[in-house]
Image (tube, rainbow, N blue to C red):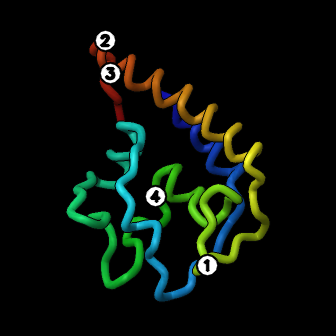
């Protein structure tokens, strides 16, 4: 439903390289779009993300918005990540507000019976 908009938000997040032993972001419970959950192949929280395999993200290319932000923002810094640039607090909040607008719209559509279609 909002795939293009979300992809645009993803593209505004700086690329980041994570240290091979870094999985700090995978130990926080997260929120995401229903469509992001579908792209991840589901999600189970058991003290860590169900996609953390051998200390690495097994769905890195399909990770949701918040995982992409982690380590690239002044609000979500990580000593194990090296972003191409660091998003400011203001820049991060702007992206989060935009993301929440689309997320709330997708959830509202789903509640009205307009389920996500692949």
Marks 4/3: CA–CA distance:
21 Å
Please say whether residue 95 is visible from this viewpoint: yes
Residue ranking furthest to the bottom:
20
| Residue 110, numbered label | 3
Q: Mark 4 or mark 3: which comes first in sequence?
A: 4
Marks 4/1: CA–CA distance:
20 Å
Badge 1 is on which residue? Answer: 79
Q: In this view, does 34 lie above or below 64?
A: above
Q: Which of marks 3 and 1 is in front?
A: 1
Q: Mark 3 or mark 1: which comes first in sequence?
A: 1
Q: Which residue is drawn at 65% across and 55% down?
A: 75
Mark 3 surroundings: few (<14), some (14-19) or many (≥20) residues within 10 A: few
Residue ranking furthest to the top:
112
Marks 3/1: CA–CA distance:
38 Å
Q: Which residue is drawn at 77% across and 53% down?
A: 88
Q: Residue 62: percent from the left, percent from the top?
A: 45, 57
Badge 4 is on which residue? Answer: 63
Q: How many labels does the image show?
A: 4
Q: Say which quarter of the image contains residue 47.
A: bottom left
Q: Residue at x 76, y 63 (%)?
A: 86
Describe residue 22's horizontal placement relative to residue 46 as left or right: right
């Amino acid at each position: 439903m909002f795939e293009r908009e979300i992809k645009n938000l993803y593209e505004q997040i700086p690329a980041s390289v994570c240290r091979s032993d870094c999985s700090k972001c995978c130990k926080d419970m997260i929120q995401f779009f229903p469509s992001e959950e579908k792209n991840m192949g589901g999600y189970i929280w058991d003290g860590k993300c169900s996609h953390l395999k051998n200390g690495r993200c097994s769905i890195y290319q399909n990770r949701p918005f918040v995982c992409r932000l982690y380590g690239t923002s002044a609000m979500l810094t990580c000593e194990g990540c090296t972003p191409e640039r660091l998003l400011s607090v203001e820049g991060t909040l702007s992206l989060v507000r935009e993301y929440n607008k689309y997320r709330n719209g997708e959830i509202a559509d789903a509640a009205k019976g307009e389920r996500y279609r692949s």
